[in-house]
Amino acid sequence: MGLKLVLVCGLFVVIAMVPFSLGRMSADNSLRDNQIDPSCMITTESGTEVCFDDATEFRQTGSKPESQPAQSKILGGDIPAARAVVDPHPAFVGVAVDPINDIVVMADTNRKSVVSYERSLGASKSGETSEMRRQIIGPETNIGFVAGVAVDPVRRELYAVNNDIEDTMMVWSYDAHGNAKPSRLLAVPHQAWGVALSQSRNEIAVSIELQSAIVIYRREAIGLEAPVRYLRGAQTGMADPHGIYWDDKNNELAVANHGNFRGLLKNTGMGCEQVAAANVPDEGGRFQPPSVTFYAATAKGDEKPLRTIQGTRTQLDWPMGIDVDAPRDEVAVANNGDNSVLIFRRTATGDVAPLRTLRGPRTRINRPMGVSIDTKNNEIWVSNFGDHTALVFAREASGNATPKRIIRSAPAGAPSSGFGNPMAVAYDSKREEILVPN
Protein backbone atom coordinates (compact mmCIF):
# COMPACT_ATOMS: atom_id res chain seq x y z
CA MET A 1 0.00 0.00 0.00
CA GLY A 2 1.37 3.41 -0.96
CA LEU A 3 0.59 6.96 0.08
CA LYS A 4 0.67 10.02 -2.14
CA LEU A 5 0.66 13.64 -0.94
CA VAL A 6 -0.97 16.22 -3.17
CA LEU A 7 -0.81 19.95 -2.41
CA VAL A 8 -4.23 21.50 -3.00
CA CYS A 9 -4.75 25.18 -2.13
CA GLY A 10 -2.27 25.04 0.74
CA LEU A 11 -3.58 21.76 2.13
CA PHE A 12 -1.98 18.36 1.79
CA VAL A 13 -4.46 15.71 0.67
CA VAL A 14 -3.49 12.11 1.35
CA ILE A 15 -4.49 9.61 -1.32
CA ALA A 16 -4.22 5.97 -0.35
CA MET A 17 -3.35 3.59 -3.17
CA VAL A 18 -4.55 0.12 -2.21
CA PRO A 19 -3.65 -2.88 -4.34
CA PHE A 20 -6.51 -5.27 -4.97
CA SER A 21 -7.25 -8.38 -6.96
CA LEU A 22 -10.23 -8.85 -9.27
CA GLY A 23 -9.79 -12.62 -9.53
CA ARG A 24 -9.15 -15.42 -7.09
CA MET A 25 -5.50 -15.85 -6.27
CA SER A 26 -3.69 -18.51 -4.29
CA ALA A 27 -2.37 -17.64 -0.86
CA ASP A 28 1.16 -17.12 -2.16
CA ASN A 29 -0.04 -15.34 -5.33
CA SER A 30 1.91 -17.85 -7.42
CA LEU A 31 0.86 -18.79 -10.95
CA ARG A 32 0.43 -22.31 -12.18
CA ASP A 33 2.06 -23.42 -15.39
CA ASN A 34 0.26 -22.71 -18.67
CA GLN A 35 -2.39 -20.47 -17.04
CA ILE A 36 -3.14 -16.80 -17.55
CA ASP A 37 -2.53 -14.64 -14.49
CA PRO A 38 -5.95 -14.71 -12.74
CA SER A 39 -5.41 -11.18 -11.41
CA CYS A 40 -6.09 -9.91 -14.93
CA MET A 41 -9.40 -11.73 -15.28
CA ILE A 42 -12.79 -10.01 -15.60
CA THR A 43 -16.28 -11.29 -16.34
CA THR A 44 -18.00 -9.78 -19.37
CA GLU A 45 -21.72 -9.03 -19.61
CA SER A 46 -22.23 -12.40 -21.32
CA GLY A 47 -20.67 -14.19 -18.33
CA THR A 48 -17.41 -15.20 -20.05
CA GLU A 49 -14.13 -14.67 -18.21
CA VAL A 50 -11.38 -12.95 -20.20
CA CYS A 51 -8.11 -11.25 -19.36
CA PHE A 52 -7.90 -7.45 -19.38
CA ASP A 53 -5.49 -7.58 -22.33
CA ASP A 54 -7.89 -9.82 -24.26
CA ALA A 55 -11.08 -7.87 -23.46
CA THR A 56 -10.95 -5.72 -26.59
CA GLU A 57 -10.43 -8.74 -28.87
CA PHE A 58 -13.28 -10.56 -27.14
CA ARG A 59 -15.67 -7.65 -27.70
CA GLN A 60 -14.68 -7.46 -31.37
CA THR A 61 -14.63 -11.20 -32.28
CA GLY A 62 -16.79 -12.81 -29.62
CA SER A 63 -14.16 -15.51 -29.10
CA LYS A 64 -11.57 -15.95 -26.42
CA PRO A 65 -7.89 -15.97 -27.53
CA GLU A 66 -5.83 -19.13 -27.22
CA SER A 67 -4.12 -19.67 -23.87
CA GLN A 68 -0.58 -18.38 -23.67
CA PRO A 69 2.32 -19.63 -21.56
CA ALA A 70 2.47 -18.26 -18.04
CA GLN A 71 3.62 -14.67 -17.95
CA SER A 72 2.98 -11.52 -15.98
CA LYS A 73 0.11 -9.48 -17.41
CA ILE A 74 0.49 -5.68 -17.31
CA LEU A 75 -2.71 -3.76 -16.61
CA GLY A 76 -3.36 -1.05 -19.16
CA GLY A 77 -5.11 0.05 -22.33
CA ASP A 78 -8.79 0.55 -23.00
CA ILE A 79 -10.23 -1.79 -20.36
CA PRO A 80 -13.65 -1.93 -18.72
CA ALA A 81 -14.07 -1.52 -14.98
CA ALA A 82 -14.68 -4.71 -13.05
CA ARG A 83 -17.63 -2.98 -11.39
CA ALA A 84 -18.79 0.55 -10.61
CA VAL A 85 -20.77 2.36 -7.93
CA VAL A 86 -22.80 4.84 -9.94
CA ASP A 87 -26.20 6.46 -9.79
CA PRO A 88 -27.63 6.62 -13.35
CA HIS A 89 -30.38 9.07 -12.41
CA PRO A 90 -30.41 12.86 -11.91
CA ALA A 91 -29.98 14.06 -8.30
CA PHE A 92 -31.71 17.37 -7.62
CA VAL A 93 -29.99 20.36 -5.99
CA GLY A 94 -31.28 23.88 -6.68
CA VAL A 95 -34.89 24.42 -7.81
CA ALA A 96 -36.72 27.38 -9.38
CA VAL A 97 -40.36 27.48 -10.49
CA ASP A 98 -41.76 29.73 -13.22
CA PRO A 99 -45.56 29.91 -12.76
CA ILE A 100 -45.97 32.25 -15.75
CA ASN A 101 -44.60 29.73 -18.26
CA ASP A 102 -45.60 26.71 -16.14
CA ILE A 103 -42.18 25.08 -15.86
CA VAL A 104 -39.87 24.09 -13.01
CA VAL A 105 -36.08 23.92 -13.39
CA MET A 106 -33.64 21.92 -11.26
CA ALA A 107 -29.88 21.47 -11.12
CA ASP A 108 -28.65 17.88 -11.32
CA THR A 109 -25.22 17.46 -9.77
CA ASN A 110 -25.07 13.69 -10.35
CA ARG A 111 -25.43 13.53 -14.14
CA LYS A 112 -24.03 17.07 -14.51
CA SER A 113 -27.14 18.48 -16.13
CA VAL A 114 -29.96 21.00 -15.79
CA VAL A 115 -33.46 19.54 -16.13
CA SER A 116 -36.91 21.06 -16.54
CA TYR A 117 -40.43 19.67 -16.11
CA GLU A 118 -43.96 20.86 -16.69
CA ARG A 119 -45.06 22.57 -13.48
CA SER A 120 -48.30 20.60 -13.11
CA LEU A 121 -46.59 17.22 -13.54
CA GLY A 122 -46.33 14.61 -10.83
CA ALA A 123 -49.05 12.41 -9.31
CA SER A 124 -48.32 11.92 -5.61
CA LYS A 125 -49.24 8.20 -5.70
CA SER A 126 -47.31 7.31 -8.84
CA GLY A 127 -43.97 5.57 -8.41
CA GLU A 128 -42.95 5.97 -12.04
CA THR A 129 -40.24 8.24 -13.38
CA SER A 130 -41.63 11.64 -14.39
CA GLU A 131 -41.29 12.77 -18.00
CA MET A 132 -38.71 15.52 -18.48
CA ARG A 133 -39.51 18.56 -20.57
CA ARG A 134 -35.83 19.28 -21.34
CA GLN A 135 -32.41 18.11 -20.15
CA ILE A 136 -29.29 20.17 -20.88
CA ILE A 137 -26.37 17.74 -20.69
CA GLY A 138 -23.05 17.15 -22.44
CA PRO A 139 -19.49 18.53 -22.74
CA GLU A 140 -20.51 21.66 -24.68
CA THR A 141 -22.82 22.79 -21.85
CA ASN A 142 -19.93 23.49 -19.41
CA ILE A 143 -22.07 21.98 -16.62
CA GLY A 144 -20.06 20.35 -13.85
CA PHE A 145 -20.73 20.33 -10.10
CA VAL A 146 -23.83 22.45 -10.67
CA ALA A 147 -25.65 23.93 -7.66
CA GLY A 148 -28.04 26.90 -7.76
CA VAL A 149 -30.50 27.77 -10.52
CA ALA A 150 -32.69 30.79 -11.31
CA VAL A 151 -35.29 31.55 -13.98
CA ASP A 152 -36.21 34.67 -15.93
CA PRO A 153 -39.89 34.33 -16.95
CA VAL A 154 -39.82 37.55 -18.98
CA ARG A 155 -36.90 36.60 -21.26
CA ARG A 156 -37.47 32.84 -20.92
CA GLU A 157 -33.93 32.22 -19.74
CA LEU A 158 -32.51 29.94 -17.05
CA TYR A 159 -29.32 30.45 -15.03
CA ALA A 160 -27.09 27.88 -13.31
CA VAL A 161 -23.80 28.15 -11.38
CA ASN A 162 -21.03 25.58 -11.01
CA ASN A 163 -19.77 25.18 -7.48
CA ASP A 164 -16.48 23.39 -7.02
CA ILE A 165 -14.56 23.01 -10.28
CA GLU A 166 -15.66 24.95 -13.37
CA ASP A 167 -16.21 28.33 -11.61
CA THR A 168 -18.73 29.59 -14.14
CA MET A 169 -22.32 30.76 -14.49
CA MET A 170 -24.24 29.54 -17.55
CA VAL A 171 -27.33 30.98 -19.23
CA TRP A 172 -29.62 29.19 -21.71
CA SER A 173 -32.94 29.72 -23.41
CA TYR A 174 -35.89 27.74 -22.02
CA ASP A 175 -35.84 25.83 -25.32
CA ALA A 176 -32.22 24.62 -24.96
CA HIS A 177 -31.87 20.85 -24.88
CA GLY A 178 -29.16 18.22 -25.00
CA ASN A 179 -25.54 19.21 -25.57
CA ALA A 180 -26.36 22.92 -25.89
CA LYS A 181 -23.72 25.63 -25.53
CA PRO A 182 -24.69 28.42 -23.10
CA SER A 183 -25.91 31.60 -24.71
CA ARG A 184 -23.78 33.41 -22.11
CA LEU A 185 -20.90 32.09 -19.99
CA LEU A 186 -19.51 34.12 -17.08
CA ALA A 187 -16.44 33.39 -14.95
CA VAL A 188 -17.28 33.64 -11.23
CA PRO A 189 -15.16 33.12 -8.07
CA HIS A 190 -14.43 29.60 -6.86
CA GLN A 191 -17.18 27.78 -4.93
CA ALA A 192 -20.20 29.71 -6.18
CA TRP A 193 -23.42 28.10 -4.94
CA GLY A 194 -26.56 30.24 -5.19
CA VAL A 195 -27.79 32.58 -7.93
CA ALA A 196 -30.57 35.19 -7.80
CA LEU A 197 -32.01 37.58 -10.38
CA SER A 198 -33.30 41.12 -9.93
CA GLN A 199 -35.71 42.22 -12.65
CA SER A 200 -35.96 45.76 -11.31
CA ARG A 201 -32.18 46.33 -11.16
CA ASN A 202 -31.28 44.12 -14.14
CA GLU A 203 -28.60 42.43 -12.01
CA ILE A 204 -27.51 38.93 -10.91
CA ALA A 205 -26.23 38.01 -7.43
CA VAL A 206 -24.05 34.94 -6.79
CA SER A 207 -23.10 33.52 -3.38
CA ILE A 208 -19.46 32.42 -2.86
CA GLU A 209 -18.86 29.84 -0.13
CA LEU A 210 -15.07 30.07 0.10
CA GLN A 211 -14.87 33.83 0.50
CA SER A 212 -18.11 34.26 2.49
CA ALA A 213 -19.19 36.77 -0.11
CA ILE A 214 -21.90 37.88 -2.51
CA VAL A 215 -20.86 39.19 -5.93
CA ILE A 216 -23.27 41.19 -8.09
CA TYR A 217 -23.02 41.38 -11.89
CA ARG A 218 -24.91 42.99 -14.72
CA ARG A 219 -27.62 40.58 -15.85
CA GLU A 220 -25.98 40.28 -19.27
CA ALA A 221 -22.41 39.96 -17.97
CA ILE A 222 -20.24 37.59 -20.00
CA GLY A 223 -16.71 36.20 -20.08
CA LEU A 224 -14.30 37.74 -17.58
CA GLU A 225 -16.46 40.75 -16.78
CA ALA A 226 -15.91 42.10 -13.26
CA PRO A 227 -18.79 42.42 -10.77
CA VAL A 228 -20.38 45.82 -10.29
CA ARG A 229 -20.04 45.42 -6.51
CA TYR A 230 -19.59 42.78 -3.84
CA LEU A 231 -20.43 42.09 -0.19
CA ARG A 232 -17.55 40.61 1.83
CA GLY A 233 -16.03 41.04 5.25
CA ALA A 234 -16.31 40.18 8.93
CA GLN A 235 -19.10 42.71 9.56
CA THR A 236 -21.40 41.19 6.91
CA GLY A 237 -22.02 38.19 9.17
CA MET A 238 -21.83 35.84 6.19
CA ALA A 239 -20.21 32.46 6.81
CA ASP A 240 -20.21 29.84 4.06
CA PRO A 241 -23.23 31.30 2.20
CA HIS A 242 -25.34 28.98 0.05
CA GLY A 243 -28.90 29.88 -0.93
CA ILE A 244 -29.62 33.46 -2.00
CA TYR A 245 -32.83 35.25 -2.99
CA TRP A 246 -33.33 38.74 -4.43
CA ASP A 247 -36.50 40.29 -3.01
CA ASP A 248 -37.38 43.00 -5.53
CA LYS A 249 -40.52 44.05 -3.66
CA ASN A 250 -38.61 44.95 -0.49
CA ASN A 251 -35.27 45.76 -2.17
CA GLU A 252 -33.40 43.16 -0.13
CA LEU A 253 -31.09 40.17 -0.50
CA ALA A 254 -31.68 37.13 1.73
CA VAL A 255 -28.80 34.68 2.29
CA ALA A 256 -28.63 31.26 4.00
CA ASN A 257 -25.31 30.63 5.82
CA HIS A 258 -23.88 27.32 7.05
CA GLY A 259 -21.70 29.09 9.62
CA ASN A 260 -18.20 27.96 8.56
CA PHE A 261 -16.24 31.21 8.52
CA ARG A 262 -12.88 30.43 6.91
CA GLY A 263 -11.29 33.77 7.57
CA LEU A 264 -10.67 36.43 4.97
CA LEU A 265 -8.95 34.89 1.97
CA LYS A 266 -6.71 36.45 -0.62
CA ASN A 267 -4.88 34.75 -3.47
CA THR A 268 -1.24 35.78 -3.07
CA GLY A 269 -0.17 34.04 -6.25
CA MET A 270 1.25 31.10 -4.31
CA GLY A 271 -2.07 29.37 -3.57
CA CYS A 272 -4.79 30.11 -1.02
CA GLU A 273 -3.72 31.50 2.34
CA GLN A 274 -5.77 32.68 5.30
CA VAL A 275 -4.57 36.25 5.26
CA ALA A 276 -6.55 39.45 5.55
CA ALA A 277 -7.72 41.33 2.50
CA ALA A 278 -5.91 44.62 2.02
CA ASN A 279 -8.77 46.88 3.15
CA VAL A 280 -10.02 44.97 6.22
CA PRO A 281 -8.53 43.92 9.57
CA ASP A 282 -7.03 40.47 10.10
CA GLU A 283 -9.77 37.91 10.67
CA GLY A 284 -9.15 34.23 11.46
CA GLY A 285 -11.51 31.37 10.77
CA ARG A 286 -14.12 30.15 13.24
CA PHE A 287 -17.34 28.16 13.51
CA GLN A 288 -20.52 30.21 13.85
CA PRO A 289 -24.13 29.09 14.27
CA PRO A 290 -26.01 28.81 10.96
CA SER A 291 -27.98 31.89 10.03
CA VAL A 292 -30.16 33.78 7.56
CA THR A 293 -28.91 37.30 6.86
CA PHE A 294 -30.69 40.15 5.06
CA TYR A 295 -29.05 43.08 3.24
CA ALA A 296 -30.15 46.13 1.32
CA ALA A 297 -30.15 45.42 -2.42
CA THR A 298 -27.53 48.15 -2.85
CA ALA A 299 -25.24 46.93 -0.04
CA LYS A 300 -21.54 46.61 -0.82
CA GLY A 301 -18.19 46.04 0.84
CA ASP A 302 -18.05 45.09 4.51
CA GLU A 303 -21.59 46.25 5.24
CA LYS A 304 -23.59 44.97 8.21
CA PRO A 305 -26.81 43.02 7.60
CA LEU A 306 -30.19 44.67 8.14
CA ARG A 307 -31.32 41.63 10.14
CA THR A 308 -29.96 38.24 11.19
CA ILE A 309 -31.95 35.11 12.13
CA GLN A 310 -29.60 32.99 14.26
CA GLY A 311 -29.71 30.88 17.43
CA THR A 312 -30.91 27.59 18.88
CA ARG A 313 -34.61 28.44 18.65
CA THR A 314 -34.35 28.93 14.89
CA GLN A 315 -33.67 25.18 14.32
CA LEU A 316 -31.37 26.10 11.43
CA ASP A 317 -29.14 23.16 10.49
CA TRP A 318 -27.17 23.28 7.22
CA PRO A 319 -29.60 25.72 5.54
CA MET A 320 -29.34 25.39 1.77
CA GLY A 321 -31.85 26.96 -0.64
CA ILE A 322 -33.91 30.00 0.37
CA ASP A 323 -36.93 31.83 -1.08
CA VAL A 324 -39.00 34.83 -0.03
CA ASP A 325 -42.80 34.92 -0.17
CA ALA A 326 -43.07 38.70 -0.50
CA PRO A 327 -46.91 38.95 -0.52
CA ARG A 328 -47.09 37.05 2.79
CA ASP A 329 -43.89 38.54 4.27
CA GLU A 330 -42.39 35.08 4.84
CA VAL A 331 -39.08 33.40 4.06
CA ALA A 332 -38.67 29.64 3.49
CA VAL A 333 -35.42 27.73 4.09
CA ALA A 334 -34.48 24.20 2.96
CA ASN A 335 -33.01 22.80 6.20
CA ASN A 336 -30.79 19.98 4.96
CA GLY A 337 -29.46 18.90 8.36
CA ASP A 338 -32.76 17.68 9.80
CA ASN A 339 -34.89 17.02 6.68
CA SER A 340 -37.23 19.97 7.05
CA VAL A 341 -38.37 23.27 5.57
CA LEU A 342 -38.51 26.22 7.97
CA ILE A 343 -40.77 29.23 7.37
CA PHE A 344 -39.95 32.47 9.21
CA ARG A 345 -41.49 35.92 9.32
CA ARG A 346 -39.47 37.94 6.79
CA THR A 347 -38.96 40.78 9.24
CA ALA A 348 -37.87 38.47 12.09
CA THR A 349 -34.47 38.94 13.70
CA GLY A 350 -32.41 37.28 16.41
CA ASP A 351 -33.01 33.89 18.02
CA VAL A 352 -36.60 33.35 16.87
CA ALA A 353 -38.61 30.18 16.26
CA PRO A 354 -40.06 29.51 12.79
CA LEU A 355 -43.68 30.44 12.12
CA ARG A 356 -44.19 26.86 10.96
CA THR A 357 -42.13 23.86 9.94
CA LEU A 358 -42.56 21.12 7.34
CA ARG A 359 -41.06 17.99 8.90
CA GLY A 360 -41.97 14.31 9.37
CA PRO A 361 -42.18 10.98 7.53
CA ARG A 362 -45.32 11.87 5.58
CA THR A 363 -43.61 14.92 4.06
CA ARG A 364 -40.99 12.68 2.38
CA ILE A 365 -38.46 15.49 2.73
CA ASN A 366 -35.04 13.83 2.35
CA ARG A 367 -31.89 15.98 2.44
CA PRO A 368 -33.55 19.05 0.91
CA MET A 369 -31.31 21.28 -1.18
CA GLY A 370 -33.68 23.80 -2.72
CA VAL A 371 -36.98 25.55 -2.08
CA SER A 372 -39.10 27.71 -4.40
CA ILE A 373 -42.43 29.44 -3.72
CA ASP A 374 -45.13 29.68 -6.39
CA THR A 375 -47.33 32.56 -5.27
CA LYS A 376 -49.60 32.26 -8.33
CA ASN A 377 -50.61 28.63 -7.70
CA ASN A 378 -50.16 28.71 -3.89
CA GLU A 379 -47.46 26.02 -3.78
CA ILE A 380 -44.03 25.38 -2.26
CA TRP A 381 -41.48 23.28 -4.17
CA VAL A 382 -38.77 21.31 -2.36
CA SER A 383 -35.92 19.51 -4.16
CA ASN A 384 -34.55 16.41 -2.40
CA PHE A 385 -30.98 15.26 -2.87
CA GLY A 386 -31.55 12.01 -0.95
CA ASP A 387 -34.01 10.13 -3.15
CA HIS A 388 -34.44 11.54 -6.70
CA THR A 389 -37.59 13.54 -5.91
CA ALA A 390 -39.00 17.05 -5.94
CA LEU A 391 -42.04 17.63 -3.71
CA VAL A 392 -44.91 20.07 -4.11
CA PHE A 393 -46.79 21.25 -0.99
CA ALA A 394 -49.64 23.63 -0.41
CA ARG A 395 -48.29 27.11 0.27
CA GLU A 396 -49.66 27.10 3.83
CA ALA A 397 -48.60 23.48 4.59
CA SER A 398 -47.21 22.80 8.05
CA GLY A 399 -46.07 19.91 10.22
CA ASN A 400 -46.11 16.34 8.93
CA ALA A 401 -48.02 17.25 5.75
CA THR A 402 -48.34 15.05 2.68
CA PRO A 403 -47.09 16.51 -0.63
CA LYS A 404 -49.67 17.33 -3.31
CA ARG A 405 -47.45 16.04 -6.13
CA ILE A 406 -44.08 14.36 -6.57
CA ILE A 407 -41.69 14.61 -9.49
CA ARG A 408 -39.33 11.65 -9.75
CA SER A 409 -36.07 11.42 -11.70
CA ALA A 410 -36.00 7.66 -10.97
CA PRO A 411 -38.56 4.97 -10.09
CA ALA A 412 -39.75 5.04 -6.46
CA GLY A 413 -37.30 3.24 -4.21
CA ALA A 414 -34.34 3.50 -6.60
CA PRO A 415 -31.19 3.75 -4.44
CA SER A 416 -29.12 6.91 -4.46
CA SER A 417 -25.34 6.75 -4.06
CA GLY A 418 -25.36 10.05 -2.19
CA PHE A 419 -22.29 11.24 -4.08
CA GLY A 420 -21.93 14.99 -4.12
CA ASN A 421 -18.51 15.83 -5.53
CA PRO A 422 -16.28 12.82 -4.77
CA MET A 423 -12.61 13.75 -5.07
CA ALA A 424 -10.87 10.79 -3.43
CA VAL A 425 -11.42 7.17 -2.46
CA ALA A 426 -9.91 4.82 0.11
CA TYR A 427 -10.29 1.11 0.84
CA ASP A 428 -10.70 -0.19 4.41
CA SER A 429 -9.26 -3.71 4.14
CA LYS A 430 -10.26 -4.64 7.70
CA ARG A 431 -13.97 -3.89 7.19
CA GLU A 432 -13.86 -4.43 3.42
CA GLU A 433 -15.44 -1.04 2.81
CA ILE A 434 -14.86 1.69 0.25
CA LEU A 435 -14.75 5.19 1.76
CA VAL A 436 -15.75 8.13 -0.46
CA PRO A 437 -15.56 11.68 0.95
CA ASN A 438 -17.76 14.23 -0.83
Image (cartoon, rainbow, N blue to C red):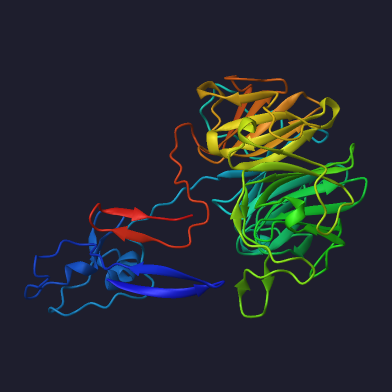
* Residue 136 shows in the view: no
Residue at image position (28%, 69%) is 52
Q: Residue furthest right?
A: 200
* Residue 159 x %, y %: 75, 51
Task: Identify whether 177 is placed above or below 356.
Answer: below
Q: Is residue 351 left or right of residue 128?
A: right
* Residue 61 shows in the view: yes
Query: How many numbered marks appear?
Result: 0
Task: Identify whether 436 is placed above or below 264.
Answer: above
Q: Is residue 159 left or right of residue 220?
A: left
Q: In the depicted view, which residue is nearer to us: 209 or 170? A: 209
Residue at image position (63%, 30%) is 313
Q: In the depicted view, which residue is nearer to us: 159 or 282? A: 282
- The quadrant in which the N terminus is found is bottom left
Q: Write down the quadrant of residue 105 in the picture.
A: top right
* Residue 260 x %, y %: 60, 52
Q: Write down the quadrant of residue 301 in the picture.
A: bottom right
Q: Is residue 407 left or right of residue 422?
A: right
